[in-house]
Image (cartoon, grey):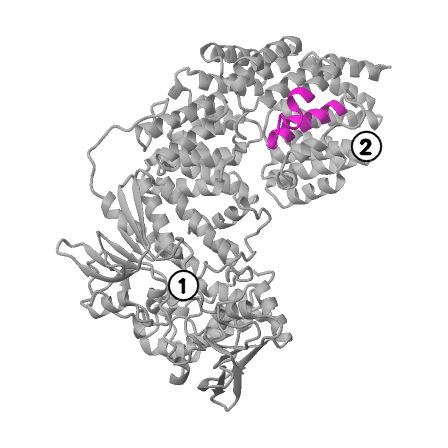
Amino acid sequence: MAVVGAGAAGALVAVQLCEGAARRRVPLDLILVDPAPEAGRGTAYATEVPEHRLNVPVGGMSCYPDDPGHFRRWLCRHGEPTVTAADFASRYRYGSYLADTLGRAIITAHGTVSVRRLRTRAVGCADTAGGRLELRLADGGTVTADGVVLATGPAAGRSGWAPAELVASDRFVPRPWAPGALDAVGASDDVLLVGTGLTAVDLALVLDRPGRTVHAVSRSGLLPQPHAVAPLPPVPPPAGLAALPFPRLRRELMRHFAATRRAHGDWRPAFDGLRPEIVRLWQGLTDDERAEFLGRDATPWNVHRHRMAPSTAETVSRARAARRLRVHAGRVASAAPQEDGGLRVSLADGRELRVAWVVDCTGPGLRADAGGDPLWSGLLSDGLAVPGPLGIGVSTDGGRLLDARGQRERPLFTLGAPRRGELWETTAMPEIRQQAKEIAEAVLAPLTSAPRAARRRPTDQFGLPLSTHAAAAASFRCGLARVITVRAKAAESFARAVELDPGFALGHAALALLGHECGADVDVARELADAQRSVRERGDERERSFVEVVTRRIKEHEAHAGAAGDGDTALVDHLGRFPADAFALGIAVPTIAFSGVADLDGTLALGLVERTASAYEGHWFHTSLLSFVRQEQGRIEEAGELARAALAAQPASGHAVHALAHVHYESGEHRAGRDWLDGWIGGQGRGAVHRAHFSWHVALHELALDDSAAVRRRWFAQLAPGQVNGVRALVDSGSLLWRARMSRNWTGRVPVDGVLDAVARDLVERPSTAFTALHSAVALAAAGDLPALRRLRAHAAGADPVQREVVVPLCDALEAVLEEEWATAVRELRGLLPSLRRVGGSAAQREVVEETLLYALVEAGHSDTARHLLEQRLDRRASPLDRRRLAGLSL
């Protein structure tokens, strides 16, 4: 396969071909033909002028149609951590992004796709006897390929507007982006730019300096409009526009623009809302109507549709205010040389401009062969391509060139600017990336559609088939084993699986889930997009269902107030159909690794474990989960037996260890539990993930034993920042400090500031789950940070129902504690207890709220209520700490 042109369009086609072939495991030889020194930049993104910004915000410039945040995340990883989707990046940075994305795609596809770059131009294309295509190259060579993609970008303009005497002048610059085109312009030379569109704006930024006047002239004298600094959401156009005759369509659109401006104070949302309809409206016009649009409306359309970045507009405005940039409405009529070597340019209305240079900024030509490109000229003259409507670009069938007979039999494709005649809206990144994806699918589909001999697929540990090869399956099984035992480096195993097979959907889905729920160092959005794309191309029903589960869980948390429980519903349904999916079952049960399904009384998770029992036949993993569920039900003795049985079969089972830790705690066996768990952490637990949580359990025993010195030693040795980071620092380290303070086992200021510093601020103040939000509130209370606690409350008030109904009153209660308004604190905390289970996690974790209530009761002077609560706790389990507190209340 050959791609002619390695600018933005060619790079995107190459990315899609590399990644698509790798996912499908289709061998492919790919040749990129382009003389540029670096793929991806082309003319637009080779400029190193920092003022040359993209004309589209960062959020609209991703390489991938199904991953709109990809470019923003790339910028965050490459030195711009605060960039937002509404910012305008430099064009050079965008070229670096394209080049890097292509390079990564080539590396990912290595072994499946071989890529060659030919630093030359294609000057011709012809059929071969074998049904292939032959490219003739400018260096005299040829390339024969099964298919060719012409990603040549916009055609060069012809400067047809220029008088003959101007064209003959050595002071005329017909192609301003050619290397060295402006090198001869002197520091004080005045310059005339012919054209006032985005090209003229770019050149004005380059040429602007004190002592020079830059003139810009066009028939309209209109510069592009700026983007809004604070853009509003798009406003969709009225329905039924496509059925209207052009005069009425035009009137309806003008009314729509005017109504939007009246309603929102800005016309831009109307244009942005019209964007998805433009192709359909254009294709509904006759050639006469299109010609009328070009003659009457194209200029104001382009002025409003193709806008400047706000910072660019501000720079242009300053230059105009200083009279260094002067914009004229007019037409160049003639040009005459001057004695000083400059030019006297006469406009049609008689005005004269004396300048040293004239630069053609009228932009690209509309015809494919407008700039005399021998490749397109040859294709058109040989009948392998035909002009598009009104002679603009070429005619295609979904990107595949139509020949002079109206046939699309050749594997000859194009995208972007050459399709402008049939699409009109086709030169911006959202359209180009979608066309690149469609071309790659059209190229690869015939290579993957041939039926293959049936072969046995590899399976996971529980006999479920995996749509991958043996090596990737082995890495996946290793990752799954680490997940179900709660061992470290599961993400590394899944990453190895998708490195071996980039089209392995379950591997990508597993990485997305670990990044989302466990804080693994993963680009969640990218892995999710890869999982969705891969499972469409290669995935069975179970794998498609699992990817849908992961998608819903991630999207539900991102949306905060999305469809409540949508992810849980999908997970329950999935396990109903595929009970042996151990990864899914591990997600569903809220133990130590995942947040689990959310329900008020825990019966949903219990039901899932019980209903899936027959699929596991007593396997230690299922027994471990069942033991955890039983202790949450209060069936402590049975839970202990189950946990010990699971550990006898697999001593490294983190789920069983976790369940037994809860059994010891709820049984009041604090010394035995402390000693056993401490020994496990130092032995089998050395390779466990979430070791901090196991240390937290040991510290709970020490706290219950009223051993404040041991709690302090434990915290500094195993739970202090540096030992624990991210969400575990909140859940384990921060909550322990608050509990120690509430039980008066830690006097003075607790060292919680370091805990908060170890956690991303967004995670603290804008958590995606109620469980994390509860622990954020506790940590902020421990730090005495009322402003941050209030910001968390404001976030929770606009988040999902559990945060609104549980976390908001918790924040109010903790604020009352910090303000020593004890009656309010008691009232809010007591009201919370019945619904606290909704945040998820274990009873031992949620007990931090009850500890806070005990403290508030004592401070409020409600000794009888505090005594009653402590007696209830002691009836349930032994605790020297609670005995000491009860004795204190009896004095």
Q: Which residue is more in the foreground, 509 or 392?
A: 392
Q: Is residue 531 left or right of residue 143?
A: right
Q: Looking at the rendering, which quadrant does residue 716 occupy?
A: top right
Residue, disc 2: 822
Secondary structure state at the residue bearing disc 1: loop
Q: Is residue 483 left or right of residue 435?
A: right
What residue is drawn where x is 30% and y is 31%? 469
Residue, disc 1: 427
Secondary structure state at the residue bearing disc 2: helix
Q: Which residue is more in the foreground, 522 or 148?
A: 148
Q: Which residue is more in the foreground, 564 or 466?
A: 466
Q: Which residue is more in the foreground, 814 or 370?
A: 370
Question: Residue 857: in sight, yes or no?
Answer: yes
Residue 616 in the image, given as x and y percentages of width and height: 39, 19
Q: Is residue 568 left or right of residue 810?
A: left
Residue 281 in the image, given as x and y percentages of width and height: 38, 68
Image: 298 above or below 699:
below
Extreme-right residue of the structure? 891
Which amino acid lies under the numbered mark 2 shown in the image of this protein? Trp
What residue is drawn where x is 66% and y is 9%? 671
Answer yes or no: do the residues labelled 1 and 2 have beta carbons within 8 Å?
A: no
Q: Total label count?
A: 2
> In front: mark 1 or mark 2?
1
Question: Residue 66: in sight, yes or no?
Answer: no
Range of the magenta residues?
716-741
Residue 123 in the image, given as x and y percentages of width and height: 26, 63
Extreme-bottom residue of the structure? 350
Crowding at dot 2, Cα within 10 Å, few <14 / some 14-19 / many 20+, comes out as many
